[in-house]
Image: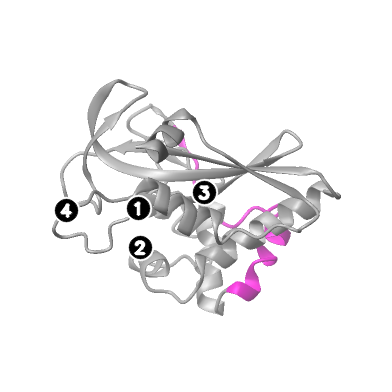
Amino acid sequence: MDQNPFFGSKMIKIVKVPLQLEPFLDKFRDLFTKPSYGSFRDLCGALSVCDKSKTVSNLCDTMADCSKGKKSRSSYNWFFSDANWDENEVAQRKVDLFIDSLCLKKNDKILLIIDDTYNEKEGNQTDGVGKFYDHSKEAYIWGNNFVTSVVQSKGLFIPHKAKMYIKNDDENENFKTKMEIAFEEIIKPLVVPKSIDLYIVFDSWWFLSMAV
């Protein structure tokens, strides 16, 4: 363990993927090439213990230097930017496993809850960074804006997908509104058994934006 200079306490370092996670992660193996699955497994293991913001840099720092198979930070960046895997397939597999684990039956309900959130930043080097009005704070913030989603059933929920909203400007040729992002990239790709009732849940802001 290493000393955390900000809190004066020990920072957890992971030396291998927790044994409890291995069987679950193995169910995603066929969605990746062998090298990409190794990156996926490493990052999920780091996510399970990282107590800082979940950037690639912090996840790499969470992996101990002696961790077997640990890769360079650039390799994990490449996994997100250029590796050949489909985020919709990964998200769908996670939902399928969630449904199976709850033994959902005919006419059981699943909620797909969609919202947006802000991640404050400093500087302007991050993709999509800009000035946004945060309704929860009733103030403008500088950062990123994400359309987020969770899947819920029987009182339990799992994170689903998060997609960055990028403002409409001259450089953004593929601009999408938040509602378009929600429908095209989160709602439309999701598949649930026909016997299960799927409900899409938004808060009042989304309904107002549709009415404008």
Residue, x 82% and y 46% (percent of image)?
Answer: 107
In the image, 197: left or right of 177? right
On residue 169, which mark appears? Answer: 4
Residue ranking furthest to the front: 211
Q: Is residue 19 magenta?
A: yes
Is tag 3's residue or tag 1's residue first in the polypeptide sequence? 3
Residue 206, x across and y down, in percent: 44, 36
Q: How far is disc 4 from disc 1 in space, using C-alphas?
A: 29 Å
Marking on residue 57: 1
Amino acid, disc 3: Leu
Front residue of 183 and 21:
183
Find residue 121 and report its horizontal and vertical position in percent.
25, 39
Residue at the location (50% across, 31% down)?
Answer: 203
At label 2, which amino acid type do we have? Answer: Arg
Residue under label 2, please give it: 73
Which SS class for mark 1? Answer: helix
Depth order, front residue of 147/82:
147
Which quadrant of the view contains residue 53? top left
Q: Which mark is residue 49?
A: none
* Lower sequence index among marks 4 and 2: 2
Cα separation, mark 2 vs mark 3, equals 15 Å
Can you give x and y, in whole percent of width and height, for residue 189 in the image?
56, 62
Q: Which mark is first along the chain, 3 or 2? A: 3
Q: Three-letter amino acid code at disc 1?
A: Ser
Region rendered in magenta = 10-31
Q: Residue at x 38, y 27 (%)?
A: 8
Q: Is residue 149 above or below residue 76?
A: above
Q: Which residue is under mark 3?
A: 47
Q: Does the CB distance between marks 1 and 2 fall below 8 Å?
A: yes
Farthest residue to the left: give it.
170
